[in-house]
Image: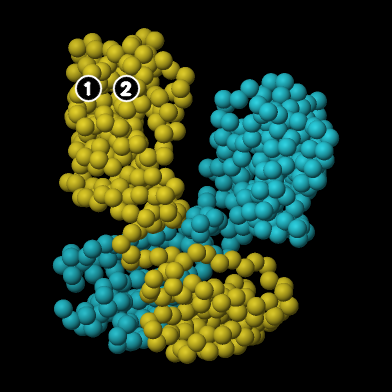
Chain colours: A yellow, B cyan
């Protein structure tokens, strides 16, 4: 096997495909790392052809235009590259893969990586809400598949289609909330509150804001307007027949309830795992989580239940 | 506003960041379409800096290595670019976005675009099964999030976590299958069969294969081995106490049943929307779908139910 010669053969075989497009060609030969050929067109688009000595060939095309335009042209070019490569290696190619085009610089950003850093493109077709609060950037984007999606500082938080999440943190339909005292920590999107209020509880208290979660008043404002499939009308008023919303840090509220002996049948902790900010005495995430758990146990009736993520 | 001058100012401001890496530099100036600067390092990696006159600046870094290595270095470089740009425009930058690295050429392919062409990266950590049947490529890949995932010719088909799909096509838990006659068209992954058999039906007949679906014998072989959370043991034998699996094209089977007057309480059509191949007389997808529907109605009892995607 002569790898350097193979690299050169690939370059020579593919060169005419790019050259016939009327390009400026620049070729870099690393000797021991293969080739990089750059083909630049007059209209501002260009192609990178990277040939690695161990046989990996990468073709990247970049252009500035309406992404629906020119897609056929791109496919034709890639078909030719694939064909020529198959000829050259007599069909003996391990794998061929084309990835969808990545769209950058548009008004609508469709790429919202997961918490574990994976690239995910959503079918977003509208920016519904986009505001900066003192704490974070708040976006609500519309997806055909998921409905409106709440995105806080780039992290996908909740979509209108996420009823399953709300149902799960409420005990998957196995709990009877009728006539019960319920405390929700966090939950600023209103989803849990909305679903529990339907079940005729005695009283639901939702404590939401500031250091204890990454929900702030502007998130609530956005949700009550644009996430109504999730929250219905429960965020329109901070008080209803069987519920109240306290826009307060939950820690002092929990301490107060514990001191007063106020007890609940259910405590549902929907605070985010990592708080956006904690006061200095609760400076580690684990300490913060333990504090919340300890205080929750203090306000929970003996046969009460605690649900969390 | 002097756009050409701005382009040049960006290039000049960012150039030193790349140059200090010890690179070979190539600059293309389109005049009316901005700049492309290519910076090539000795180790085989390179960077493309594309500056558009209307203000979009794209930086692409490509390198060949273990993706965990060098990530910090990349972040540092991009931090510098971001910083320099903010200095240059006095913080007046509309948007900054970094996307996760795209990994190509590895043993494990993590990118499986959706049916509507969106790029999705799965947390795949193992290739469990990878075979070519006469009809298609069959892959079963393991994802931490979804369990084993069945992928047919690049299309994500079903994951072990997709019980919700199976439940939905069975009527979302609202149907009583006890003592009933059930016909499943397709469903070669065994998910529906497995779930219905648990509900003590009189008899379930599953008709699976060939032209009517994109499931073939090798798919069944892969599923019964590697998708057991989905199908349990029902695919181990083609006949059980209350079920049978017919490896036949469903159209002649339906015709035979209709002629014999064999009737069902439930027909569940889990055939894919677009059949992989149809015989010449059913050459359009719509005609094929209508034929299946017509034949299904002929074998359905008067109070029977038909479920499909």
Q: Are marks 2 and 1 in contact (CB under 8 Å)?
A: yes
Counting residues from the start of the chain, the first of labels 2 and 1 encountered is 2
Horizontal placement of B187 versus A49: left or right?
A: right
Q: In which image quadrant can residue B187 be found? A: top right
Most foreground residue, B15 or A12: A12
> Which residue is found at the position 46% from the left and 75% from the top?
A70
Give the SS element for disc 2.
Answer: helix
> Which residue is found at the position 26% from the left and 75% from the top?
B54
Give the SS element for disc 1.
Answer: loop
**Image: A285 above or below B5:** above
Marking on residue A240: 1
- Tell me, yes or no, if residue B219 can be seen here: yes
Residue A81 location, x and y as percent?
Answer: 59, 78
Residue B132 location, x and y as percent?
Answer: 74, 58
Marking on residue B39: none
Horizontal placement of A283 versus A83: left or right?
A: left
* Chain letter behind tag 2: A
How many C-alpha atoms fall within 10 Å of the one at disc 1: few (<14), some, or many (≥20)? some
Q: Tell me the distance, in whole angstroms, between the alpha carbons under discs 2 and 1.
A: 9 Å
> Which residue is found at the position 62% from the left and 86% from the top?
A13
Residue A130 location, x and y as percent?
Answer: 25, 51
Most foreground residue, B89 or B119: B119
Residue at the disc numbered 2? A197
Quadrant of the drawing holding the C terminus of chain B: top right
Q: In which image quadrant can residue A157 be found? A: top left
How many C-alpha atoms fall within 10 Å of the one at disc 2: few (<14), some, or many (≥20)? some
Quadrant of the drawing holding the N terminus of chain B: bottom left
Residue A156 location, x and y as percent?
Answer: 36, 46
- Tell me, yes or no, if residue B44 can be seen here: no
């Amino acid at each position: 096997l002569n790898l350097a010669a193979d690299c050169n053969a690939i370059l020579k075989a593919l060169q005419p495909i790019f050259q016939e497009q009327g390009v400026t060609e620049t070729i870099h030969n690393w000797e021991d790392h293969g080739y990089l050929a750059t083909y630049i067109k007059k209209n501002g688009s260009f192609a990178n052809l990277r040939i690695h000595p161990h046989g990996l060939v990468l073709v990247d095309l970049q252009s500035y235009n309406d992404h629906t335009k020119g897609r056929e042209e791109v496919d034709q070019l890639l078909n030719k590259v694939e064909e020529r490569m198959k000829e050259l290696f007599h069909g003996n190619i391990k794998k061929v893969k084309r990835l969808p085009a990545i769209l950058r610089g548009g008004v609508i950003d469709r790429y919202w990586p997961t918490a574990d850093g994976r690239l995910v493109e959503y079918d977003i077709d509208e920016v519904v809400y986009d505001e900066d609060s003192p704490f974070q950037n708040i976006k609500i984007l519309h997806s055909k598949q998921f409905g409106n999606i709440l995105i806080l500082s780039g992290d996908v938080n909740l979509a209108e289609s996420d009823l399953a999440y709300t149902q799960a943190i409420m005990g998957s339909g196995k709990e009877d909330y009728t006539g019960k005292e319920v405390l929700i920590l966090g939950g600023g999107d209103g989803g849990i509150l909305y679903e529990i209020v339907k079940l005729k509880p005695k009283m639901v208290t939702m404590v939401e804001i500031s250091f204890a979660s990454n929900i702030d008043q502007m998130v609530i404002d956005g949700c009550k307007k644009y996430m109504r499939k999730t929250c219905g009308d429960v965020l329109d008023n901070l008080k209803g027949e069987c519920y109240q919303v306290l826009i307060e840090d939950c820690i002092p509220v929990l301490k107060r309830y514990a001191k007063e002996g106020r007890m609940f049948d259910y405590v549902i902790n929907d605070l985010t795992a990592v708080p956006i900010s904690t006061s200095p005495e609760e400076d580690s995430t684990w300490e913060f989580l333990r504090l919340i758990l300890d205080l929750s146990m203090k306000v929970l009736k003996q046969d009460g239940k605690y649900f969390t993520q």
